[in-house]
């Protein structure tokens, strides 16, 4: 197959498939080959499902030939290995689920399947989505395609690296505290975390239920719009999914930005932000001014409390969510347990990695009698304050902007010994999760050859506006179309 | 009887009354929904192990609970029936602990904000006085599965059919002062949930069971004693026995210088004793917190009004009506309204013999109840339809047969299923109301018993009964008793 097809956006690929420029089988084989060639260097995938992918591609080709099939018929994508996929190993990046073949499809997976997408494989991730560097995966770290000594970010590191290296035009991902936006920023791709409740969590292995949200990593905002339309919507199987209509996100991508009020998050331009990164962010803001937007500084006074609040709420929920991994019904079971307690202790002790254990212990502690009020309840109050701060800000501005991360990608191993430093990498992203807001990260330049991400945060269910704002920037710039030389 | 009970000297009344028992019950009633509280699995009893457990019940990775609206309606129904405040906003919480029959590692329950707030239930004590037992709260929760040990050498099996079955847990105030009161309260709740059709009340299958919190204190003491919680009592008899045993145990312990420990105990029905399961120190810290997978339950006024409108006539209301409408005693009215089916049966009978409500009550509570009990049948089992019993009572009312003959007819009806009239006809049991026939029989009896006749006439009035018996015997019991009395009196006087 001719070179350069992998450089096309998902929108272009979907159109090309319909125009019969190439078949889904050709496209799928191309990406499968790219994935396999990249594995030794990037390790972006836990499972590559070649046989199922080729079969699905051929079925999609039959649909395309008969002018049937969903809007994304034949488009290959990758799924983060946190989403349950029927008949396919679903590990969540953990030894605990190394032997787990899901008997069902997550709602998001089923909806995308119905839209016609072809699954290439399951993307690597931090274990149970707990991590900001993809170093906690049982399957080894993912490497950043821009520099393989560096992390891709996490927890959706495999998804971001796969799109950055064009191993897939898009990859599903999840964001609990920045797990879509942070790796998107560090890998130079577009990441969208929708409003909490916009995308069903059914079949997405839970980390912190009140914060988890499925989303997408793509090359462009337009691609994200096309996919979000397919995966969003109310799901009777998820009580926290919201029953509001799903718009055609692509329809409003080109709406002019004149009069758009952008709020600069004062708290994000702090001393932790690398000056070179800040420069790229300021340049991007200048581009928006050129597009007719106005800028003003906005303060969210409680936002600096987001990291401590998050590291109470998320571990608390995780400690309970991960209790089901007990070696009884599925997943890892220790050899020859002596008794029930031994079965629990060794199955969990062997099945979980260090970071997961740390969070289970933290969460167990903060929920314990005598500590609940001081930690969990206090954190929930802080969460409410942060939400109120955002609501007040959106009374003044249409969208909030700032950096996605304090710095560009860091070296593998640089932060593993100090969890607090690692946690602080999510300082700019956690607020949107605590408030349940939609947010994006889009590429806005490079510092020493490494991508920088601009973060956009909007009011609840403002995905169409965020995608519009991101798309118009991408029409003016070409950062999002840059690909690391080796994968160009 | 246990060894300790056997060796203990009988406690005198004065000793026993130096102590006061304090009891609170936590009743678990399984709601009669079609499916589980958070999944679509059916909840029918007796299916093969794990045949009624889907991925949600198994706690598979990624699955989520979805609340069964019918379970909510049923809890609201209960709350309204006991005059409780229904929470406009209630919250499901996770109770975290590890156990193999608890697939998720937590039970979804309600903790700080239950759906039903304070209410009360009135019970009638043995001496007829009424007592109000406070209900602290009632909340919705899911049941756990079961561990199986029988027939599985060396391993334990797990059956998750019951996991996720909807329960309403009804928590009483510590208002009961004896095992009998506790049983009366439990029976009243049992009656109520069946009236409301929110629970089948089947105690053998575990659909209705309770935990009893029991403590003792010296009479007059203000503070409660330390309590023990007796788990999983699934019969009224066990509740009474377990509490009585526990009260004795605690009094003995304190009187011999010991201290009651706060602990969970199990009742062993075979040995008739309670024994320690785990102490407070060993108790789990359940780390309750609101379940982030479920939204708060928000009830609007219209739903509550809708449920209120669907409430049936409740047992207390029905008993009052029975007393006034049928002229029954409070006791009879109480017995006849103990279940909706019994009350309906009674009313069906009473409707057909409108002038004899008391007769109908006596027969339903007497012969019929005894026969059902003997055969282990339920009133709604169709064994003797109300119209059939009414057919018999009509004949009594119009004096076609005597009460005594009626019992014979009833037995035949019970055995054959035939109508009363057919049996009366076939066996020739129709009462003799022809005066001349009765007189003939009297004459014969008098002729055969000249000695007794002379004695009677010389003042031995007691022999009147003898003559009644003889005439009845001669007429095979068919002589109309009132007529017989009148005629016999005349004839004997000469």
Image (tube, rainbow, N blue to C red):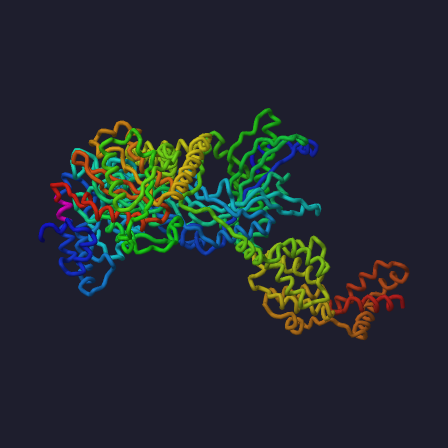
A427, A179: nearer the viewer:
A427
Q: Is residue B457 left or right of residue B241?
A: right
Q: Is residue A419 left or right of residue B38?
A: left
Q: Give the image location of residue A215, x and y in percent.
A: 29, 47
* Residue at (68% x, 33% y) in the render: B17
Q: Give the image location of residue B247, x and y in percent.
A: 60, 35
B110, A192: nearer the viewer:
A192
Residue range in magenta is: A32-37
Residue that sits furthest to the left in the current view: A2
* Residue at (84% x, 69% y) in the render: B487
Q: Give the image location of residue B163, x and y in percent.
A: 42, 47
Residue B155 visible here: no
Q: Quadrant of residue B457?
A: bottom right
Q: Give the image location of residue A294, x and y in percent.
A: 31, 43
A310, B121: nearer the viewer:
A310
The image quadrant where one finds the N terminus of chain B is top right
Instruction: Decide whether residue B236 is among the magenta residues.
Output: no
Q: Is residue A410 left or right of residue B345?
A: left
Q: Quadrant of residue A310?
A: top left
Q: How many marks?
A: 0
The image quadrant where one finds the C terminus of chain B is bottom right
Residue B242 visible here: yes
Relative to A270, residue B159 above or below = below
């Amino acid at each position: 197959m001719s070179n350069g097809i992998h450089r096309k956006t998902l929108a272009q690929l979907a159109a090309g498939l319909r125009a019969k420029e190439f078949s889904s089988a050709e496209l799928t084989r191309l990406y499968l080959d790219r994935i396999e060639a990249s594995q030794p260097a990037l390790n972006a995938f836990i499972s590559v499902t070649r046989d199922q992918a080729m079969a699905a591609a051929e079925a999609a080709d039959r649909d395309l030939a008969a002018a049937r099939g969903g809007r994304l018929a034949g488009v290959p994508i990758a799924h983060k290995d946190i989403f349950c996929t029927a008949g396919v190993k679903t590990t969540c990046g953990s030894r605990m689920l190394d032997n787990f073949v899901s008997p069902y499809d997550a709602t998001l997976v089923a909806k995308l399947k119905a839209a016609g997408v072809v699954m290439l494989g399951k993307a690597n991730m931090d274990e149970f989505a707990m991590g900001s560097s993809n170093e906690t995966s049982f399957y080894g770290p993912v490497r950043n395609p821009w520099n393989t000594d560096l992390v891709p970010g996490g927890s959706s590191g495999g998804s971001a690296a796969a799109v950055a290296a064009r191993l897939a035009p898009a990859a599903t991902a999840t964001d609990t505290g920045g797990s879509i936006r942070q790796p998107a920023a560090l890998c130079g791709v577009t990441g969208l975390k929708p409003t909490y409740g916009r995308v069903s969590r059914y079949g997405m292995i839970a980390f912190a239920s009140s914060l988890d949200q499925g989303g997408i990593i793509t090359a462009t905002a337009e691609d994200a719009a096309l996919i979000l339309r397919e995966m969003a919507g109310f799901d009777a199987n998820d009580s926290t999914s919201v029953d509001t209509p799903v718009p055609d996100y692509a329809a409003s991508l080109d709406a002019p930005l004149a009069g758009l009020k952008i709020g600069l998050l004062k708290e994000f331009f702090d001393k932790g932000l690398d000056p070179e990164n800040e420069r790229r962010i300021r340049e991007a803001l200048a581009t928006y001014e050129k597009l007719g937007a106005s800028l003003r500084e906005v303060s969210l006074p409680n936002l600096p409390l987001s990291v401590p609040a998050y590291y109470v709420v998320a571990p608390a929920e995780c400690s309970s969510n991960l209790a089901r991994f007990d070696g009884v019904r599925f997943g890892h079971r220790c050899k020859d347990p002596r008794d029930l307690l031994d079965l629990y202790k060794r199955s969990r002790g062997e099945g979980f990695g260090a970071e997961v254990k740390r969070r289970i212990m933290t969460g167990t502690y903060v929920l314990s009698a005598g500590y609940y009020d001081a930690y969990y309840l206090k954190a929930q109050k802080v969460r409410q304050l942060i939400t109120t701060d955002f609501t007040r800000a959106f009374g003044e501005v249409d969208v909030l902007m700032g950096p996605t991360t304090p710095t560009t990608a860091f070296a593998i191993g640089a932060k593993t010994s100090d969890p607090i430093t690692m946690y602080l990498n999510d300082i700019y992203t956690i607020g949107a999760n605590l408030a349940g807001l939609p947010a994006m990260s889009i590429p806005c330049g490079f510092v020493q050859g490494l991508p920088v991400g601009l973060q956009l945060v909007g009011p609840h269910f403002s995905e169409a506006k965020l995608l519009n704002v991101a798309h118009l920037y991408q029409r003016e710039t070409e950062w999002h179309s840059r690909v690391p030389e080796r994968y160009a | 009887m246990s060894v300790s009970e056997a060796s203990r000297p009988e406690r005198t009344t004065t000793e026993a009354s130096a102590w006061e028992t304090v009891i609170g019950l936590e009743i678990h009633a399984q709601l009669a929904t079609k499916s589980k509280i958070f999944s679509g699995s059916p909840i029918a009893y007796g299916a093969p192990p794990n045949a009624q457990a889907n991925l949600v019940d198994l706690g598979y990775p990624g699955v989520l609970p979805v609340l069964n609206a019918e379970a909510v309606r049923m809890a609201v129904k209960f709350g309204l029936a006991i005059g409780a405040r229904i929470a406009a906003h209630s919250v499901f919480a996770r109770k975290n602990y590890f156990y193999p029959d608890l697939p998720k590692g937590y039970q979804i329950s309600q903790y700080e904000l239950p759906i039903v707030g304070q209410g009360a239930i009135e019970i009638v004590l043995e001496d007829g006085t009424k007592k109000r037992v406070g209900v602290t709260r009632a909340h919705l929760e899911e049941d756990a599965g079961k561990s199986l040990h029988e027939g599985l050498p060396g391993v334990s099996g797990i059956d998750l059919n019951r996991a996720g079955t909807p329960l309403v847990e009804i928590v009483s105030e510590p208002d009961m002062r004896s095992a009998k009161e506790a049983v009366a309260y439990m029976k009243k709740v049992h009656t109520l949930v069946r009236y409301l059709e929110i629970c089948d009340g089947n105690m053998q299958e575990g659909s209705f069971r309770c935990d009893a919190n029991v403590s003792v204190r010296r009479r007059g003491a203000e503070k409660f004693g330390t309590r023990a919680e007796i788990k999983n009592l699934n019969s009224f008899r066990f509740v009474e026995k377990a509490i009585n045993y526990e009260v004795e145990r605690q009094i003995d312990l304190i009187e011999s210088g010991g201290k009651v420990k706060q602990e969970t105990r199990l009742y062993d029905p075979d040995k008739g004793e309670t024994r320690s399961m785990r102490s407070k120190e060993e108790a789990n810290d359940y780390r309750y917190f609101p379940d982030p997978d479920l939204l708060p339950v928000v009830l609007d006024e219209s739903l509550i009004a809708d449920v209120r409108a669907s409430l049936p006539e409740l047992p207390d209301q029905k008993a009052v009506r029975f007393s006034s409408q049928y002229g029954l005693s409070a006791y009879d009215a109480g017995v006849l309204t103990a279940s909706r089916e019994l009350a309906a049966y009674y009313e069906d009978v009473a409707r057909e013999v409108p002038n004899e409500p008391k007769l109908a009550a006596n027969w339903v509570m007497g012969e019929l109840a005894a026969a059902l009990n003997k055969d282990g049948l339920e009133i709604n089992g169709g064994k003797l339809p109300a119209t059939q019993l009414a057919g018999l009572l009509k004949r009594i009312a119009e004096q076609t047969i005597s009460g005594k003959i009626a019992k014979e007819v009833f037995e035949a009806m019970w055995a054959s299923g035939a109508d009363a009239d057919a049996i009366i006809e076939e066996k020739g049991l129709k009462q003799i109301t022809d005066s001349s026939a009765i007189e003939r029989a009297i004459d014969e009896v008098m002729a055969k018993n000249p000695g007794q006749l002379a004695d009677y006439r010389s003042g031995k009035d007691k022999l009147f009964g003898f003559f009644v018996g003889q005439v009845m015997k001669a007429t095979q019991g068919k002589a109309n008793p009132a007529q017989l009395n009148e005629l016999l009196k005349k004839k004997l006087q000469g």
